[in-house]
Amino acid sequence: MDVNVGSDTKAYRRSKVDKKLLRKQIKSSHTLLRHEGINTSLVPTKSLVVANGGLGNGVSREELSAVLKEMGSLKTLLMPPKKPYAFVTYGSEENARKAHIYLNGQKLQREEKEKNDVTLYLSFVDTVPCEQQTSVTMPAGLVLVEDFVSSEEEAVLLAAIDWSSHNNDATGLPEKCQPVLQRCMENGHLTTMPDQLTVNQYESGQGIPPHVDTHSAFEDTILSLSLGAKTVMEFRHPDGRVVNVFLPGRSLLVIRGESRYLWTHGITPRKFDMVPASDPQCLAPTTCDHGPLNQLTLSKRGTRTSFTFRKIRIDPCRCAFPTVCDSQGAPSPPSPPSIPRGPSDAARLEVEYVHRVYDAIAPHFSSTRHSPWPQVCHFLSLLSPGNVLADVGCGNGKYLGVNPAVISVGCDRSSALIQICTNRGFQAFVADALHVPLRTASCDACISIAVIHHFSTTERRLAAVKELVRLLKPGGHALIYVWAFEQEYKEQKSKYLKNNNPTNDTCGVTTAPEGKSSACVRSNLEDNKKKPADDCTVTHDKVGVHINRTAFNSQDLLVPWHLKEGKRGKSKGESEVARTNEDKTKFSTDSFPNGPDLRSYSNTDSQHDSLTSAEPVFHRYYHVFQQGELEQLCVQVKEIKLQRSYHDQGNWCVILEKPVN
């Protein structure tokens, strides 16, 4: 072969790659202009904008800085909070040109395995945003004391924890805590000694729901001692103000006055936090909401252990915030639903926490359900032309058009979802999965995808399987999918867990802090009927609220759905859920007049979600199935044969066959 021909081919390939890179670079420039108002320049300058190199992409300052410094000396590196880009200014235009040539289209090698690779796209800019020093005032009464305990004291306190103990009635606080509490008294952080201690341990990715400790249960001052890893705690005022406080290891947080009674506090469940960079010139190391843009980075969470000291209140609270004080007549948060004890209880729970919820969230829910699951599509592809398929619990109908050669009909309990099916041209009708108005033995195949886990008793789940079998012709097949308790199977995490974005600030709600909890320790009180700490209360007959994108801790739970603006639906026979105003901190509370407020429910002593979240939050009931449970349910139906069972992306699945004889 002619050498020149080979050389020309290689040059052509390089040119093709260069063209592709140029297209992507232009696209990123247009995106920056359209969404962020950033004008890029074709003329080289000392400054560049680095698309995909921002804190919002999970890129830390250390990762990006190391790559950029390879091209030359940096003058500034600005990383705006929660944005997918950064600005870099080099000491010379020559170094900026070099970065533009060699780093464009390059993948950034990540330090953490949890992070996805990102491809950097660099463009010149004429101007860089000025670093703005915005002052964020700490909540009144909130004090953070760094390095309050020494490393030696930290080790002693951690070693003193007995995680195996379940004794909630131990007398007195541990002796190991006395030196710390005495120092609090001497430094003026306490006026009286606490008599209650709660110890919790949080792994990376776990959090605490936004809440206010019950006024009537505890006195004013609450102390939180952070041991081990650092974290960020969010304080939110009812008017929408948010202050993110950086809690270093071995620090003491004193919560009193307005910060204790009025502001909610919580920790968002995620694996990375946006924190001040380790810069000796950092002006405000205690908060993450102010300071120049070049002082922020991402920090991976480790294991944090908290010691929370409280003083149990004897007399009613007389704080200066009566509108949120339960002792002064403020409404209490809704009570969590109980696990059903009979058919009527189960039906009521499903109406409130399944049927009404899906009607309310239908447009938003449908917008997130557009990709059919491959294994379900494979099942449908095996059906013969002219076969009759019933999709029981069809949702927005995404499986009704997978195999156009079959006669497909769907049904769902949500009239709002059925309307979406109708608008898409599918044959669907409103029906309960326990009573489908189709003739017995009229279907060649049935599918029930993510439906049966919404039934709240074993009897009702079994009835749903029997109804599918009733619809099948002899020789027909049914495919059932239910959510699995085991979200990590054969050392593989499901997409539900993998999609836990480390920089996602959407906070789920849970019944208690999602961490390991030791026994609550308190001294003896004359009033033995006094309500103990919320962290100590275990309500085994209540349905807990799950933190999104985390492993399940129980089988019966409520899963939050954060309703996005512009994706509101209408509940059948009821008023449309009111649109929020501009700051999205208020919404209608009368959309469900006959039941609990599904949007603001939380099984914690917390303020309503309308005060702690920018979006209304609904809660859907689920019974997540343990391994083997679905098979055990199906084999109770005599006229069926279990053909296959498998695990598919966090779901337990079975294929049933109705024998010909």
Image: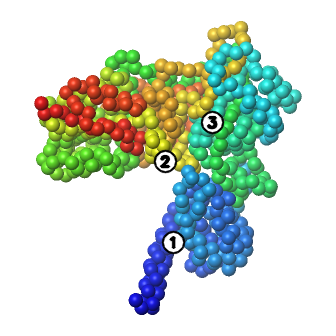
Q: Mark 3 points at which residue?
A: 202
The answer to whether the residues at label 3 and label 2 have Cβ atoms under 8 Å apart is: no
Q: Which of marks 2 and 1 is in front?
A: 2
Q: Nearer the viewer, mark 3 or mark 1?
A: 3
Q: In which quarter of the image is the C terminus?
A: top left
Amino acid identity at mark 2: Asn
Label 3's element? strand
User: Would residue 256 be found to the left or right of residue 64 on screen?
Assistant: right
Residue 358 in view in this figure? no
The Cα–Cα distance between marks 2 and 1, rounded to whole angstroms, is: 27 Å
The Cα–Cα distance between marks 3 and 2, rounded to whole angstroms, is: 20 Å
Residue lying at 54% horizontally and 28% vertically, measured from the top left: 511
Label of residue 25 in the image: 1
Instruction: For label 1, count other residues whose C-alpha is less than 10 Å away and answer few (under 14), some (14-19) or many (20+).
Output: some
Q: Name the residue under label 2.
A: 499
Residue 185 location (% of width, % of height): 84, 27
Amino acid identity at mark 3: Tyr
User: Would residue 375 be found to the left or right of residue 54 on screen?
Assistant: left
Residue lying at 55% horizontally and 69% vertically, measured from the top left: 106
Label 1's element? helix
User: Would residue 510 be found to the left or right of residue 304 on screen?
Assistant: left
Label 2's element? loop
Amino acid identity at mark 1: Gln
Residue lying at 62% horizontally and 25% vertically, measured from the top left: 535
Instruction: For label 2, count other residues whose C-alpha is less than 10 Å away and answer few (under 14), some (14-19) or many (20+).
Output: few
The answer to whether the residues at label 2 and label 1 have Cβ atoms under 8 Å apart is: no
Residue lying at 48% horizontally and 19% vertically, measured from the top left: 541
Residue 601 location (% of width, % of height): 50, 30
The Cα–Cα distance between marks 3 and 1, rounded to whole angstroms, is: 41 Å
Residue 19 location (% of width, % of height): 46, 78
Residue 531 in view in this figure? yes
